[in-house]
Structure formats: structure tokens, C-alpha cells
């Protein structure tokens, strides 16, 4: 008879195909990488974080209306320190003479001159991105090159470009550290290039496919590469170690096939917690969460794809080098830490409970902020330094724009007058309070006689102009009732006059023409900023910080003032209203992210460990690390940008839980064949290399981002992620073991395999080792029983034994003390003798 061949599993068939067709995969990856390098230039990056606000927020709606209807010219606050008043006045004229500068506001009041420092408020001829504004800013720098100058302006700022430069430096430093860590944790030096090539390909593929998302945020664009390496490096390490184990008894091809077949389910399962944590971000009301979830989950999937389809081929290619460059284990064993954990198993858990409760209270009082204008990062850009200097000397400039339906100048005038009377308002600007000439405001309504005197034109011409305006506006009754009493707002009449002069219907000569031309320039500048076909815009400069309780209360006051004159279709837009909308969104997103990330992870752990108790214990530890992490800003009394919390909360729950899972998995396997204390020590030694590798890379990546980027949003995410990872590592190594040891009975009782309750009330038999059990046993069994009623037990028996039950030794080391009291005493003595564990 022919010998039957062993049945090949579906996973082995897939692994065989990948390994044998490795050259095909190399070709496909080469083409995909070339495409990705080209396509990375197609990615559109959004620098404005307010774009991701929910569509129903006032800020989002107001910004849409404002961007569609008005032009906002670029501005700059220019401070020149250590100059005399005469020099300050001279510099004003020199700045005003720079091409592209529309106006310069400066006087010798405390608003513009203080402590030998002059502050110039500059407005450019173009928007913040127009070339004329960029050239003008360069001209100002050149003009003031010999002075102690600080320039705070949005003109010329390219967040994406600045971040790209900073992240390039961070990535180089991180790459060096990653290589060092991988060298320490690898089994062969040649494994390192395999890992780097695998994840280099995954990172390029992810960046090259970002264009499929349409537009991504500057946050996702900047941090994804480093987070991808840190979050997914475990996948490649698992396959690498599997290959090394299999290669000890198999040739290269068979070892690679066997390793891949076993690693695919293991790695896929490991990635689920990370993906689920990131997936919780997609449910945020604030659209930045969905943006980051999409890009980061795509990064994880590309990492899985590269490990499954590219790395096997690389292992085949580098196999001989891997065999030739094997080295001893460079990661030390942590047996001493394991003994400490065992010795303190009844001390650390209650201490941890107290710490976690205190941390939860502190984290709940974390001083979140929603505007990053005033945040100070460890590394400061030239613009940030200038902003802090100007703020320290002259205070902050907090502007809000008020958008109302066009046409009701009386209402606009009343609103501006009420705001000017408020102590919280520094100044206001609108058509209703901009002077046209001789004390008349642009929105003031005048008769033909008043216009004639004001503009210096013949009364008959003025009357004819008013008749033409009335006909144009279909107001024939005004003509019939007497044009002399007809009043028209100056702004509307001047704009009508300009249009008629362009059409050639009206011609004026001499000084009148020159005067009107200058006025028309001013009107055109005002029009694009303050009035459109549908809306009017007014501006208020507040004496309040962008973010404070008083500011939020005054925004309500502004709405109340507007509400007295308009019934709807009005908006208040500015950094302060942005803060208000973001804080409202955060309240919902905070709860949502915390609940969903924990829920998703718990569901995955339930199916992974087949126990209710174990997932809860793991979640308690990681949630504790999150609370401890975010209690730090409270203790330091430093504001934390809210996105740092939301994003890191999800990442820490989804990624750092893997460290707890690694220890728990090893412990669950080992306790079946040895006492639980010894199983924990061994589990820590086996899990430490994986935790050290992944944790070190993630912590270092976060720390580097936190201290080496000037962007406050990115810096907040980096510092929180780095600190949180370190805290998680400490807790899973020095707190989780004790909790697992003390809570082992909870895990066993809540196991899905447990069919009946265990009664520990009557303990009269204790045994350890390998034994055959025949009869009824009710109690705590630390081990595996290989039968329903009769079978073999390997582990520890501490239970009530029914009369007639037989317990027979099957191994030489079997020992059955005469009483449970003596058994407990002997166990306690053995656990304090170190090496006997």
C-alpha cells in the first residue's frame, strides 16, 4: 500500500504559493513602488484643521460663507525692539513704501509703542498665499534687516512643507534608533535589512496611495510613516522568529512555508486590536479622526501585506546571510523582575488601584485647550518666537468676524455701536463706521445736496445721479415724490457712480476725478473685505484671550446683540468660535473614543482568550496607563491640545494592549504545565524581547516627534504617545503580572470552558505534579484535566475530594502532603527560594 501523504492545510497552500512565486511578487512590488513614488506627489494636504469640523457647526458654516463671499488680505504684526520714537515713525514710512504693502497702522500710543519697542500692523495687497504678499514680506525683512525685528504673520507659512522638513530629520534619527533596537532583539544581523526593506516598502506603498483619500490632513501626512513603523514592526519580528525556529529542523524553503503558514493567523489576530483602536477614531464627530483612521489603518494593512507577500521572499534571499550572522541573545533576561512581581503580588494590586483612582480624577481635570496659537513647543520656529515676543510686549490679537445679510446699514451701525461700548472690545470695523470724508461714514445715507457738498460736484449733476440710481433700483416713487429728499447710503452711491463712470455714462474732470479715484480705491478694498452680493462682514478686535471662560461668555453676548437686529442667517467666525465648537465636539468624541476603543478591544480579547475575566484585567491595566498618562498635564498645570488626548487614547488602547496580550498569552500557555508563579517568571522572560522592541520604537518615535517638531498639534500627539507607551510598558511588566497572579481564579472561573461552579469551602487535599484522577473533584485546579471524569492532571490540585476518589502518582516528583495547611506552608517556602521557581 502507498503511504498516505499528510493533508496540506489551506494556509500551507497559500504559504507555498507565496514562497514559490517570490520572484513574481518582487516584480509586482517593484512596479508598485515606482508607481507609489510618482503618486506621492499627487497627494493633497489640508493645513486648516477647521476644515474637519462637523458641517453643522457655526465655524464650519461661517468659514464657508466667508471664503465664498469675501477676500481676506494678508496681514502681519511687525515688532522692532530697542528703537526711539523718531526712528519708529521713520520706519513706518519705509515699511509703507515697500511694494505690496497696502497700509501700515502705527502711532505712539501704548497700542503701538511701548518700552522702546514699536508694533506695526501691516496689511498687504494680496491674500496670505498671493505672491505679492510673499514678496512684500521679504521686502519688509530686507528693509528692517539692521534692526531687532520680530514678524508674526500667516503670510508665507506652509505647514506641510515645514513639517516635511522636520519629519525628514526625525525619520533619519528614528531609523538609526530602530536599526539599533532591531539589532539587539534580532537573532541574526542579516535579519535587520529584511525588516527594514519590508517596512520601507509598506511605508512607500501607503504614502503613494494616500491620493485615493482625496485630501488628507497635515497630521496624517506627517506622523503616519513613523507610527506605521512603530505600530507594525511586531508583525515582521513574529515571522522572522517563526522562520528561525522552523529553520532549525527544516531546509530554507520548507521552513519559510511552515513559518508563514503559522504566522499569518497569529499576525492577523495581533493586528486586530491595533486596527480596532484606530477604527474607533473613525466615529469621531470631528473629521480629523476619520482622516487619521483611514490613513493609519491603510498603513497597518499595507504592513500586513508586505510581511505576508514580500518578506518571505526576502527571507529566502537572505537565508544564507541570516545563518552566517547569527549572534547570541543581546537582550538580558528579567528573572529578577519576575521574582519581584511574584513577591509583591499581594502588595502592588491594591497600590495600583489607589493610583489609578487618583489618576482617573486628575485625568478628568486635564487642562485641555482647543487653540494651539499660544502653545509653546520644546522646539520653536522663527514665527513662533516672534509671536511669543509680540504677545509678551503688546498682548494677543483676537479678532472675530461677524457676518450678516447685506443691506441693513442701520442694523450694522447699531451692532458696531453696541460692541464698541463693551469693555471686552478693543475696536470694530465695518462699512457703518469707516469714514468716507468730512465725518461721514460709508453707510451714512445722504441727500443729493449733501453729496454735492461732500464730493464737490454740481447739485444738478448730483440730482441726475440720484435719479439714475432710483431708476436702477426700481424706486420710481422717490423720483415722483421729490428727488431732493431722497437719501442713499454713501457707499451704495459711490459704487453706483464708479460703475456709471466705467460705462462712460458720467464723466468728471480735474481735482474731483482725482479725489473720486482715490476714494474708489478705498471702496474697492473695503468691498472685497466687507460686502458681497449677499452678506456684509464686520470685524471686532477683542481684549480677551482666544480661549477662556470669559471669552466664551462674551461670544454669547455677541450673538445676543446680533439677535436683536437679525432673525437668522448670521455667523460669528474666529479662533474663539473655533475653540467653542471644538470643545463642544470634544465632549462627545471623548466619551465615544474611550468607550468604543475599549469595547472593540474587549470583544477581540474575549474570542482570543475565551475568558471574560482576562480581557477585563488587561483593559484595566491599559486604561490605567491612559489615565496616568493624562494626569501628567494636570500635575504640571500645562495645557494639552485636545487632539493629543483623542488620538493617543485610541492608539494607546489599540497598540499598547498588545504588550499585555503577549505576556498573558505566554502565561496562559505556561501555567498548564508549571506552577503559576514559575509560569509568570518564564512568561516575562519570553515576552520581554517583543515588548522591548515594539515599545522602545514607539516610545522613541513619540518622544522624537514631541521634542523635534514646531507644530503644536503634532508635538502634543508625539509627547503624549511617547509618555503613554513608557507608562504602559512599566505597568505590563511591573503591575500586570501581580494582577494576573492574584486574579488567576477569576480568569479560570470566567473561562468559557468552565461548565460548573467551583466550591473552595472544603479544601482537604493538596497535590502537585502529574497524577491520574478517578472520581469527583470540586475545587481549584491550576492545570489541564484531560478527561471529563477520569483522566490525567498536570499542575496543582487544591480541592475538595469526594470519598472514593483515587489520586495516583504518574511521575517520580509526585508529592502529596498530609494536610492542606502543611501544603500551603511548603508552597510559600518554595516560592521565596529564588531559583527553585
Image (cartoon, rainbow, N blue to C red):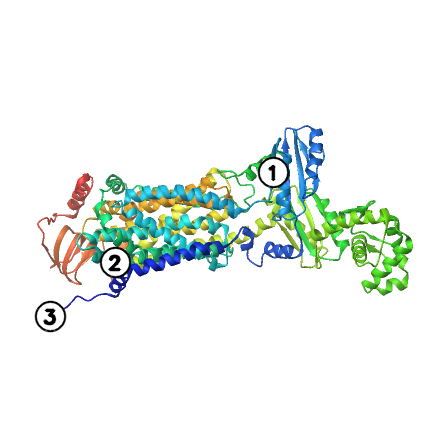
| Left or right of residue 329: residue 431 | right
Of callouts 2 and 1, the N-terminal one: 1
* CA separation in Å, label 2 and label 1: 60 Å
* CA separation in Å, label 3 and label 1: 87 Å
| Left or right of residue 261: residue 433 | right
Can the viewer see residue 705?
yes
Of callouts 2 and 3, the N-terminal one: 3
Task: From the image, tell me which residue sits under label 1.
Answer: 151
Please tell me whether mark 1 sits on a helix, a strand or a loop: strand
Instruction: State whether residue 144 is above or below residue 797.
Output: above
Asked whether the residues under the numbered discs 2 and 1 touch, taking CB atoms below 8 Å apart as contact, a structural biologist would say: no
* CA separation in Å, label 2 and label 3: 29 Å
**Mark 2 Cα within 10 Å, few/some/many (few <14, many 20+)?**
some
- Quarter holding the N terminus is bottom left
Residue at image location 73% in from the left, 48% down from the top: 416
Task: From the image, tell me which residue sits under label 3.
Answer: 2
Name the disc covering residue 205, or none.
none
- Nearest to the eye among marks 2 and 3: give it: 3
Asked whether the residues under the numbered discs 3 and 1 touch, taking CB atoms below 8 Å apart as contact, a structural biologist would say: no
Question: Where's residue 468, x and y in %?
Answer: 85, 61
Question: Where's residue 7, x and y in %?
Answer: 19, 67
Please tell me whether mark 2 sits on a helix, a strand or a loop: helix
Choose between 198 and 508: the one closer to the eye.
508
Name the disc covering residue 262, or none.
2
Of callouts 3 and 1, the N-terminal one: 3
| Left or right of residue 452: residue 59 | left
Amino acid at each position: 500500500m502507498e503511504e498516505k501523504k499528510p493533508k496540506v492545510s489551506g494556509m500551507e497552500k497559500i504559504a507555498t504559493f507565496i514562497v514559490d512565486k517570490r520572484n513574481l511578487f518582487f516584480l509586482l512590488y517593484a512596479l508598485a513602488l515606482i508607481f507609489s513614488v510618482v503618486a506621492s506627489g499627487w497627494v493633497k494636504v489640508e493645513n486648516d484643521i477647521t476644515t474637519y469640523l462637523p458641517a453643522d457647526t457655526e465655524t464650519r458654516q461661517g468659514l464657508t460663507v466667508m471664503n465664498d463671499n469675501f477676500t481676506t488680505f494678508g496681514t502681519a504684526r511687525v515688532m522692532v525692539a530697542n528703537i526711539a520714537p523718531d526712528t519708529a515713525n521713520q520706519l513706518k514710512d519705509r515699511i509703507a513704501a515697500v511694494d505690496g504693502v497696502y497700509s501700515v497702522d502705527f502711532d505712539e500710543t501704548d497700542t503701538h509703542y511701548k518700552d522702546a519697542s514699536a508694533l506695526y500692523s501691516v496689511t498687504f495687497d494680496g491674500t496670505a498665499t498671493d505672491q505679492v504678499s510673499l514678496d512684500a514680506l521679504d521686502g519688509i525683512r530686507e528693509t528692517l534687516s539692521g534692526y531687532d525685528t520680530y514678524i508674526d504673520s500667516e503670510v508665507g507659512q506652509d505647514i506641510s512643507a515645514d513639517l516635511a522638513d522636520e519629519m525628514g530629520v526625525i525619520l533619519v534619527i528614528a531609523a538609526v534608533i530602530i536599526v539599533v533596537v532591531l539589532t539587539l532583539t534580532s537573532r541574526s544581523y542579516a535579519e535587520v535589512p529584511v525588516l527594514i526593506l519590508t517596512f520601507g516598502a509598506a511605508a512607500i506603498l501607503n504614502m503613494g496611495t494616500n491620493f485615493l483619500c482625496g485630501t488628507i490632513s497635515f497630521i496624517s501626512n506627517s506622523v503616519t510613516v513613523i507610527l506605521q513603523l512603530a505600530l507594525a514592526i511586531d508583525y515582521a519580528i513574529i515571522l522572522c522568529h517563526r522562520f528561525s525556529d522552523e529553520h532549525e529542523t527544516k531546509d530554507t524553503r520548507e521552513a519559510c512555508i511552515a513559518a508563514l503558514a503559522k504566522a499569518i493567523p497569529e499576525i492577523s489576530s495581533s493586528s486586530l486590536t491595533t486596527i480596532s483602536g484606530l477604527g474607533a477614531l473613525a466615529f469621531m464627530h470631528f473629521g480629523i479622526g476619520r482622516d487619521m483612521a483611514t490613513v493609519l489603518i491603510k498603513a497597518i494593512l499595507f504592513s500586513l501585506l508586505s510581511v505576508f507577500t514580500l518578506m518571505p521572499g526576502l527571507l529566502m534571499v537572505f537565508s544564507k546571510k541570516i545563518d552566517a550572522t547569527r549572534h547570541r541573545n543581546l537582550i538580558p533576561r528579567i528573572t529578577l523582575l519576575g521574582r519581584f512581581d511574584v513577591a509583591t503580588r499581594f502588595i502592588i494590586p491594591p497600590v495600583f488601584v489607589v493610583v489609578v483612582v487618583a489618576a482617573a480624577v486628575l485625568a478628568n481635570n486635564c487642562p485641555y485647550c482647543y487653540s494651539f496659537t499660544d502653545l509653546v513647543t520644546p522646539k520653536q520656529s522663527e514665527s513662533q518666537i516672534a509671536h511669543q515676543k509680540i504677545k509678551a510686549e503688546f498682548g494677543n490679537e483676537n479678532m472675530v468676524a461677524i457676518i450678516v445679510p447685506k443691506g441693513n446699514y442701520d442694523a450694522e451701525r447699531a451692532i458696531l455701536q453696541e460692541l464698541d461700548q463693551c469693555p471686552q472690545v478693543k475696536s470694530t470695523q465695518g462699512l457703518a463706521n469707516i469714514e468716507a470724508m468730512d465725518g461721514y461714514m460709508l453707510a451714512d445715507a445722504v441727500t443729493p445736496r449733501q453729496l454735492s457738498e461732500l464730493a464737490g460736484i454740481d447739485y444738478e449733476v448730483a440730482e441726475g445721479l440720484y435719479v439714475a440710481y432710483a431708476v436702477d433700483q426700481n424706486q420710481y416713487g422717490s423720483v415722483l415724490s421729490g428727488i431732493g429728499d431722497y437719501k442713499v447710503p454713501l457707499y451704495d452711491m459711490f459704487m453706483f457712480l464708479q460703475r456709471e463712470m466705467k460705462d462712460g455714462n458720467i464723466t468728471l474732470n480735474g481735482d474731483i476725478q482725482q479725489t473720486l479715484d482715490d476714494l474708489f480705491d478705498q471702496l474697492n478694498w473695503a468691498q472685497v473685505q466687507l460686502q458681497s452680493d449677499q452678506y456684509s462682514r464686520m470685524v471686532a478686535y477683542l481684549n480677551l484671550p482666544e480661549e477662556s471662560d470669559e471669552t466664551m461668555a462674551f461670544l454669547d453676548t455677541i450673538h445676543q446683540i446680533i439677535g436683536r437686529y437679525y432673525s437668522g442667517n448670521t455667523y460669528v467666525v474666529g479662533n474663539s468660535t473655533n475653540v467653542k465648537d471644538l470643545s463642544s465636539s470634544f465632549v462627545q468624541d471623548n466619551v465615544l473614543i474611550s468607550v468604543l476603543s475599549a469595547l472593540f478591544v474587549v470583544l477581540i480579547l474575549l474570542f482570543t482568550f475565551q475568558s471574560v475575566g482576562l480581557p477585563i484585567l488587561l483593559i484595566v491595566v491599559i486604561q490605567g496607563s491612559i489615565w496616568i498618562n493624562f494626569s501628567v498635564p494636570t500635575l504640571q498645570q500645562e495645557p494639552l491640545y485636545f487632539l493629543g488626548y483623542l488620538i493617543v487614547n485610541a492608539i494607546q488602547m489599540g497598540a499598547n494592549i498588545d504588550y499585555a496580550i503577549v505576556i498573558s498569552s505566554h502565561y496562559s500557555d505556561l501555567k498548564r504545565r508549571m506552577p503559576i508563579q514559575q509560569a509568570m517568571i518564564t512568561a516575562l522572560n519570553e515576552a520581554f524581547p517583543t515588548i522591548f522592541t515594539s515599545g522602545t520604537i514607539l516610545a522613541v518615535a513619540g518622544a522624537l516627534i514631541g521634542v523635534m517638531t514646531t507644530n503644536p498639534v503634532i508635538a502634543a500627539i508625539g509627547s503624549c504617545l511617547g509618555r503613554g507607551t513608557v507608562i504602559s510598558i512599566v505597568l505590563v511588566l511591573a503591575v500586570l503580572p501581580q494582577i494576573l497572579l492574584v486574579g488567576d481564579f477569576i480568569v479560570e472561573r470566567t473561562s468559557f470552558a468552565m461548565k460548573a461552579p467551583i466550591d473552595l469551602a472544603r479544601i482537604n487535599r493538596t497535590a502537585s505534579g502529574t497524577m491520574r484522577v478517578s472520581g469527583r473533584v470540586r475545587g481549584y485546579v491550576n492545570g489541564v484535566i484531560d478527561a471529563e471524569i477520569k483522566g490525567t492532571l498536570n499542575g496543582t490540585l487544591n480541592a475538595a475530594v469526594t470519598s472514593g476518589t483515587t489520586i495516583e502518582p504518574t511521575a517520580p516528583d509526585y508529592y502529596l502532603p498530609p494536610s492542606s495547611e502543611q501544603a500551603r506552608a511548603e508552597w510559600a517556602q518554595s516560592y521565596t527560594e529564588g531559583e527553585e521557581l
